[in-house]
Image (spheres, helix red, strand yellow):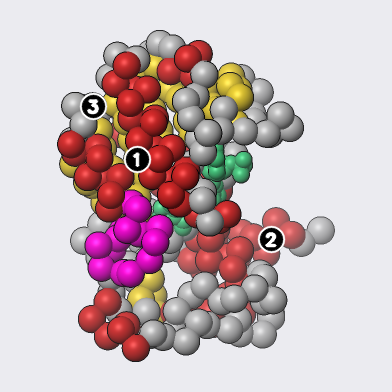
Amino acid sequence: MGVVLVTGGTGRLGRVLLPRLLAAGHEVRAPVRRPDAELPAGVEAVRGDLGVPPLPARALDGVTHVIHLASGSAEGQIDGVDLAGTRALINAARAAGHPHLIYLSIVGVEQVPSPLYSAKVEVEAMLAASDLPWTSLRTPQFHELIWGSFNRPSAAPFVVEGRRYQPVACADVADFVLGLLTRPPANAVVEMGGPEVLEATELASIYAEVMGRPQPALRPAPESLGETRDALTTPSHREGRVTWRRFVEAQRDAATP
Ligand SMILES: NC(=O)c1ccc[n+]([C@@H]2O[C@H](COP(=O)([O-])OP(=O)(O)OC[C@H]3O[C@@H](n4cnc5c(N)ncnc54)[C@H](OP(=O)(O)O)[C@@H]3O)[C@@H](O)[C@H]2O)c1
Protein backbone atom coordinates (compact mmCIF):
# COMPACT_ATOMS: atom_id res chain seq x y z
CA MET A 1 0.00 0.00 0.00
CA GLY A 2 1.23 3.50 -0.81
CA VAL A 3 1.14 6.61 1.31
CA VAL A 4 -2.21 8.33 1.95
CA LEU A 5 -2.01 12.10 2.43
CA VAL A 6 -4.86 13.53 4.51
CA THR A 7 -5.45 17.29 4.67
CA GLY A 8 -7.66 18.52 7.52
CA GLY A 9 -6.57 15.58 9.66
CA THR A 10 -7.18 17.60 12.85
CA GLY A 11 -10.81 18.40 11.98
CA ARG A 12 -14.05 16.60 12.94
CA LEU A 13 -13.83 13.97 10.23
CA GLY A 14 -10.03 13.82 10.13
CA ARG A 15 -9.80 12.91 13.82
CA VAL A 16 -12.07 9.91 13.21
CA LEU A 17 -10.55 8.92 9.87
CA LEU A 18 -6.84 8.89 10.75
CA PRO A 19 -7.01 6.05 13.32
CA ARG A 20 -9.10 3.98 10.91
CA LEU A 21 -6.56 4.47 8.12
CA LEU A 22 -3.75 3.34 10.42
CA ALA A 23 -5.77 0.34 11.62
CA ALA A 24 -6.35 -0.64 7.98
CA GLY A 25 -2.57 -0.71 7.49
CA HIS A 26 -2.13 2.48 5.49
CA GLU A 27 0.93 4.67 5.77
CA VAL A 28 -0.52 8.08 6.58
CA ARG A 29 0.87 11.59 6.22
CA ALA A 30 -0.90 14.79 7.25
CA PRO A 31 0.00 18.41 6.55
CA VAL A 32 -0.63 20.53 9.65
CA ARG A 33 -0.20 24.26 10.06
CA ARG A 34 0.34 24.36 13.83
CA PRO A 35 3.41 22.86 15.55
CA ASP A 36 1.22 21.63 18.44
CA ALA A 37 -1.29 19.88 16.18
CA GLU A 38 -2.40 16.61 17.75
CA LEU A 39 -2.25 13.59 15.47
CA PRO A 40 -2.46 9.91 16.37
CA ALA A 41 0.90 8.17 16.91
CA GLY A 42 1.96 6.67 13.61
CA VAL A 43 0.79 9.53 11.39
CA GLU A 44 3.65 11.45 9.81
CA ALA A 45 3.09 15.19 10.28
CA VAL A 46 4.37 17.61 7.63
CA ARG A 47 4.25 21.32 8.39
CA GLY A 48 2.20 23.12 5.77
CA ASP A 49 -0.50 25.74 5.46
CA LEU A 50 -2.90 25.24 2.56
CA GLY A 51 -3.58 28.96 2.60
CA VAL A 52 0.11 29.64 1.92
CA PRO A 53 1.02 27.19 -0.84
CA PRO A 54 2.93 25.28 -1.93
CA LEU A 55 3.06 22.43 0.55
CA PRO A 56 6.60 21.15 1.14
CA ALA A 57 7.69 18.64 -1.53
CA ARG A 58 7.84 15.89 1.12
CA ALA A 59 4.05 16.11 1.56
CA LEU A 60 3.26 14.37 -1.74
CA ASP A 61 6.31 12.14 -2.00
CA GLY A 62 5.21 8.55 -2.79
CA VAL A 63 1.53 9.37 -2.25
CA THR A 64 -1.06 7.16 -4.00
CA HIS A 65 -4.15 8.82 -2.50
CA VAL A 66 -4.92 12.32 -1.26
CA ILE A 67 -7.95 12.67 1.01
CA HIS A 68 -8.67 16.38 1.00
CA LEU A 69 -10.70 17.43 4.05
CA ALA A 70 -9.18 20.81 4.91
CA SER A 71 -11.47 23.81 4.72
CA GLY A 72 -10.95 27.38 5.82
CA SER A 73 -14.68 28.03 6.09
CA ALA A 74 -14.69 28.24 9.89
CA GLU A 75 -12.26 31.18 9.65
CA GLY A 76 -13.74 32.86 6.58
CA GLN A 77 -10.78 31.67 4.49
CA ILE A 78 -12.76 30.06 1.67
CA ASP A 79 -11.00 31.90 -1.17
CA GLY A 80 -7.52 31.32 0.23
CA VAL A 81 -7.83 27.76 1.52
CA ASP A 82 -10.77 26.02 -0.21
CA LEU A 83 -10.18 27.58 -3.63
CA ALA A 84 -6.56 28.76 -4.02
CA GLY A 85 -5.27 26.11 -1.59
CA THR A 86 -7.09 23.31 -3.42
CA ARG A 87 -5.90 24.60 -6.80
CA ALA A 88 -2.31 24.46 -5.51
CA LEU A 89 -2.89 20.98 -4.08
CA ILE A 90 -4.23 19.74 -7.44
CA ASN A 91 -1.17 21.14 -9.21
CA ALA A 92 1.16 19.57 -6.66
CA ALA A 93 -0.61 16.22 -7.07
CA ARG A 94 -0.29 16.44 -10.86
CA ALA A 95 3.44 17.03 -10.47
CA ALA A 96 3.74 14.11 -8.02
CA GLY A 97 2.50 11.22 -10.15
CA HIS A 98 -1.26 11.77 -10.28
CA PRO A 99 -2.51 10.20 -7.03
CA HIS A 100 -6.27 9.58 -6.66
CA LEU A 101 -7.66 12.75 -5.05
CA ILE A 102 -10.70 12.15 -2.86
CA TYR A 103 -12.49 15.37 -2.00
CA LEU A 104 -15.14 15.92 0.68
CA SER A 105 -18.11 17.90 -0.58
CA ILE A 106 -21.65 18.47 0.65
CA VAL A 107 -25.01 17.17 -0.58
CA GLY A 108 -26.99 19.97 -2.23
CA VAL A 109 -24.09 22.32 -3.00
CA GLU A 110 -25.65 23.52 -6.25
CA GLN A 111 -28.99 24.31 -4.64
CA VAL A 112 -28.26 26.22 -1.45
CA PRO A 113 -26.77 29.71 -1.79
CA SER A 114 -23.62 29.92 0.35
CA PRO A 115 -19.99 30.95 -0.30
CA LEU A 116 -18.76 27.55 0.95
CA TYR A 117 -21.18 25.62 -1.24
CA SER A 118 -20.25 27.71 -4.32
CA ALA A 119 -16.59 26.99 -3.61
CA LYS A 120 -17.32 23.25 -3.42
CA VAL A 121 -19.01 23.40 -6.84
CA GLU A 122 -15.96 25.25 -8.19
CA VAL A 123 -13.54 22.70 -6.73
CA GLU A 124 -15.50 19.82 -8.26
CA ALA A 125 -15.24 21.62 -11.62
CA MET A 126 -11.48 22.04 -11.08
CA LEU A 127 -11.14 18.31 -10.42
CA ALA A 128 -13.23 17.40 -13.47
CA ALA A 129 -11.10 19.69 -15.63
CA SER A 130 -7.82 18.30 -14.28
CA ASP A 131 -6.19 15.13 -15.51
CA LEU A 132 -6.09 13.70 -11.97
CA PRO A 133 -8.02 10.59 -11.00
CA TRP A 134 -10.63 11.93 -8.57
CA THR A 135 -13.73 11.25 -6.53
CA SER A 136 -15.84 13.92 -4.85
CA LEU A 137 -17.82 12.47 -1.98
CA ARG A 138 -20.85 14.57 -1.08
CA THR A 139 -22.35 13.89 2.32
CA PRO A 140 -25.00 15.69 4.37
CA GLN A 141 -24.14 17.45 7.64
CA PHE A 142 -22.17 15.45 10.18
CA HIS A 143 -23.87 14.57 13.49
CA GLU A 144 -20.83 16.17 15.14
CA LEU A 145 -21.50 19.54 13.46
CA ILE A 146 -25.16 19.65 14.51
CA TRP A 147 -24.28 18.42 17.99
CA GLY A 148 -21.67 21.16 18.34
CA SER A 149 -24.10 23.84 17.23
CA PHE A 150 -26.83 22.67 19.66
CA ASN A 151 -24.23 22.69 22.44
CA ARG A 152 -23.38 26.37 21.83
CA PRO A 153 -26.65 28.15 22.56
CA SER A 154 -24.83 31.51 22.59
CA ALA A 155 -23.74 31.12 18.94
CA ALA A 156 -26.02 31.83 15.97
CA PRO A 157 -28.17 28.71 15.37
CA PHE A 158 -27.02 26.53 12.50
CA VAL A 159 -30.02 24.26 11.90
CA VAL A 160 -32.65 26.02 9.78
CA GLU A 161 -36.33 25.82 10.70
CA GLY A 162 -38.38 24.09 8.00
CA ARG A 163 -35.39 22.33 6.43
CA ARG A 164 -35.03 18.57 6.35
CA TYR A 165 -31.70 16.98 7.27
CA GLN A 166 -30.10 13.57 6.83
CA PRO A 167 -27.17 13.82 9.23
CA VAL A 168 -24.43 11.23 9.27
CA ALA A 169 -21.81 10.24 11.85
CA CYS A 170 -18.18 10.96 11.03
CA ALA A 171 -17.53 7.28 11.83
CA ASP A 172 -19.83 6.25 8.97
CA VAL A 173 -18.30 8.78 6.57
CA ALA A 174 -14.80 7.61 7.51
CA ASP A 175 -15.76 3.98 6.79
CA PHE A 176 -17.15 5.03 3.42
CA VAL A 177 -13.92 6.90 2.60
CA LEU A 178 -11.90 3.81 3.54
CA GLY A 179 -13.97 1.89 1.00
CA LEU A 180 -13.17 4.47 -1.68
CA LEU A 181 -9.46 3.70 -1.24
CA THR A 182 -10.06 0.15 -2.41
CA ARG A 183 -12.01 1.18 -5.51
CA PRO A 184 -10.94 2.80 -8.78
CA PRO A 185 -11.50 6.57 -8.89
CA ALA A 186 -15.09 7.48 -9.84
CA ASN A 187 -13.93 10.57 -11.75
CA ALA A 188 -17.32 11.91 -10.69
CA VAL A 189 -19.37 13.07 -7.75
CA VAL A 190 -20.70 10.29 -5.50
CA GLU A 191 -23.06 10.65 -2.55
CA MET A 192 -23.64 8.96 0.77
CA GLY A 193 -26.00 9.88 3.58
CA GLY A 194 -27.19 9.17 7.08
CA PRO A 195 -29.80 6.52 7.90
CA GLU A 196 -32.83 8.82 8.24
CA VAL A 197 -34.28 12.09 7.04
CA LEU A 198 -35.42 14.31 9.92
CA GLU A 199 -37.16 17.65 10.19
CA ALA A 200 -35.12 20.40 11.85
CA THR A 201 -37.63 20.33 14.71
CA GLU A 202 -37.08 16.57 15.17
CA LEU A 203 -33.31 17.07 15.45
CA ALA A 204 -33.88 19.68 18.16
CA SER A 205 -36.52 17.71 20.07
CA ILE A 206 -34.49 14.46 20.10
CA TYR A 207 -31.48 16.42 21.40
CA ALA A 208 -33.60 18.08 24.11
CA GLU A 209 -35.28 14.82 25.15
CA VAL A 210 -32.09 12.73 25.35
CA MET A 211 -29.98 15.43 27.00
CA GLY A 212 -32.73 16.68 29.33
CA ARG A 213 -32.08 20.23 28.14
CA PRO A 214 -34.28 22.97 26.71
CA GLN A 215 -35.08 22.75 23.01
CA PRO A 216 -32.22 24.41 21.08
CA ALA A 217 -33.13 27.45 18.98
CA LEU A 218 -33.39 27.03 15.21
CA ARG A 219 -32.37 29.58 12.61
CA PRO A 220 -35.41 31.23 11.04
CA ALA A 221 -36.04 29.96 7.51
CA PRO A 222 -34.99 32.31 4.69
CA GLU A 223 -37.74 33.39 2.29
CA SER A 224 -36.11 31.29 -0.42
CA LEU A 225 -36.30 28.05 1.57
CA GLY A 226 -39.41 26.68 -0.21
CA GLU A 227 -37.89 24.76 -3.11
CA THR A 228 -34.70 23.87 -1.27
CA ARG A 229 -36.34 22.33 1.80
CA ASP A 230 -34.91 18.91 0.91
CA ALA A 231 -31.73 20.10 -0.80
CA LEU A 232 -29.45 18.80 1.95
CA THR A 233 -30.84 15.28 1.84
CA THR A 234 -30.09 12.32 -0.40
CA PRO A 235 -32.83 9.82 0.51
CA SER A 236 -31.67 7.13 -1.92
CA HIS A 237 -28.32 7.02 -0.09
CA ARG A 238 -28.70 5.80 3.49
CA GLU A 239 -25.33 4.12 3.99
CA GLY A 240 -24.76 5.63 7.44
CA ARG A 241 -25.83 3.40 10.32
CA VAL A 242 -25.69 5.66 13.36
CA THR A 243 -29.01 7.44 13.89
CA TRP A 244 -29.18 10.94 15.34
CA ARG A 245 -30.80 9.59 18.51
CA ARG A 246 -28.08 6.98 19.00
CA PHE A 247 -25.38 9.56 18.41
CA VAL A 248 -26.85 11.95 21.00
CA GLU A 249 -27.28 9.09 23.49
CA ALA A 250 -23.62 8.14 23.00
CA GLN A 251 -22.52 11.75 23.69
CA ARG A 252 -24.69 11.85 26.80
CA ASP A 253 -23.33 8.51 28.05
CA ALA A 254 -19.73 9.53 27.35
CA ALA A 255 -20.22 12.67 29.44
CA THR A 256 -21.84 10.82 32.34
CA PRO A 257 -19.28 10.02 35.07
N1 LIG B 1 -18.93 19.28 8.96
C1 LIG B 1 -19.89 18.80 8.16
O1 LIG B 1 -21.06 18.62 8.56
C2 LIG B 1 -19.57 18.46 6.73
C3 LIG B 1 -20.54 17.86 5.90
C4 LIG B 1 -20.20 17.51 4.59
C5 LIG B 1 -18.94 17.79 4.10
N2 LIG B 1 -18.03 18.41 4.93
C6 LIG B 1 -16.70 18.69 4.40
O2 LIG B 1 -15.83 17.72 4.93
C7 LIG B 1 -14.54 18.31 5.14
C8 LIG B 1 -14.13 18.10 6.59
O3 LIG B 1 -15.10 18.74 7.42
P1 LIG B 1 -14.84 18.88 9.00
O4 LIG B 1 -16.16 19.27 9.59
O5 LIG B 1 -14.10 17.70 9.50
O6 LIG B 1 -13.89 20.15 9.01
P2 LIG B 1 -13.38 20.99 10.28
O7 LIG B 1 -13.67 20.27 11.55
O8 LIG B 1 -13.90 22.39 10.11
O9 LIG B 1 -11.81 20.98 10.10
C9 LIG B 1 -11.18 21.76 9.11
C10 LIG B 1 -9.78 21.24 8.95
O10 LIG B 1 -9.13 22.07 7.96
C11 LIG B 1 -7.87 22.45 8.49
N3 LIG B 1 -7.45 23.73 7.94
C12 LIG B 1 -8.13 24.90 7.97
N4 LIG B 1 -7.40 25.87 7.39
C13 LIG B 1 -6.22 25.28 7.01
C14 LIG B 1 -5.05 25.75 6.37
N5 LIG B 1 -4.91 27.06 6.02
N6 LIG B 1 -4.04 24.89 6.12
C15 LIG B 1 -4.16 23.58 6.49
N7 LIG B 1 -5.24 23.07 7.10
C16 LIG B 1 -6.26 23.93 7.35
C17 LIG B 1 -8.09 22.55 10.00
O11 LIG B 1 -6.84 22.54 10.66
P3 LIG B 1 -6.57 23.24 12.10
O12 LIG B 1 -6.72 22.14 13.12
O13 LIG B 1 -5.21 23.77 11.98
O14 LIG B 1 -7.62 24.32 12.27
C18 LIG B 1 -8.94 21.32 10.23
O15 LIG B 1 -8.12 20.17 10.31
C19 LIG B 1 -14.68 19.77 4.74
O16 LIG B 1 -14.26 19.94 3.42
C20 LIG B 1 -16.16 20.03 4.85
O17 LIG B 1 -16.60 21.08 4.02
C21 LIG B 1 -18.30 18.73 6.22
In which quarter of the view is residue 106 placed? bottom left
* Residue at mark 1 to residue at mark 2: CA–CA distance: 33 Å
Tag 2's secondary structure? helix
* Residue at mark 3 to residue at mark 1: CA–CA distance: 12 Å
Tell me whether circle 3 and circle 1 mark residues in contact (CB < 8 Å): no
Q: Amino acid at mark 3?
A: Leu
Which residue bears the numbered disc 2?
Answer: 253
First in sequence: mark 2 vs mark 3: 3
The reply, left or right, for residue 257 in relation to residue 85 is right
Q: Indicate if the residue with disc 1 has its beta carbon within 8 Å of ligand 1.
A: yes
Q: Residue at x 40, y 11 (%)?
A: 62
Around disc 3, counting alpha carbons within 10 Å, would you say few (fewer than 14), some (14 to 19), or many (20 or more)? Answer: many
Q: Indicate if the residue with disc 2 has its beta carbon within 8 Å of ligand 1.
A: no
Q: Residue at x 56, y 76 (%)?
A: 157
Tag 3's secondary structure? loop
Say whether residue 163 is visible: yes
Residue 219 among those drawn in magenta = no
Residue stretch in magenta? 107-120
Residue 55 or residue 190, whichever sits in front: 55
Around disc 2, counting alpha carbons within 10 Å, would you say few (fewer than 14), some (14 to 19), or many (20 or more)? Answer: few
Q: Residue furthest top?
A: 62
First in sequence: mark 1 vs mark 2: 1
Q: Amino acid at mark 1?
A: Tyr
Which residue bears the numbered disc 1?
Answer: 103
* Residue 134, placed above or below residue 206: above
The reply, left or right, for residue 148 in relation to residue 114 is right
Q: Residue furthest right?
A: 257
x, y (%) of residue 20? 50, 32
Q: Residue at x 59, y 76 (%)?
A: 156
**Could you tell me how many numbered marks the image carries?**
3
Which residue bears the numbered disc 3?
Answer: 132
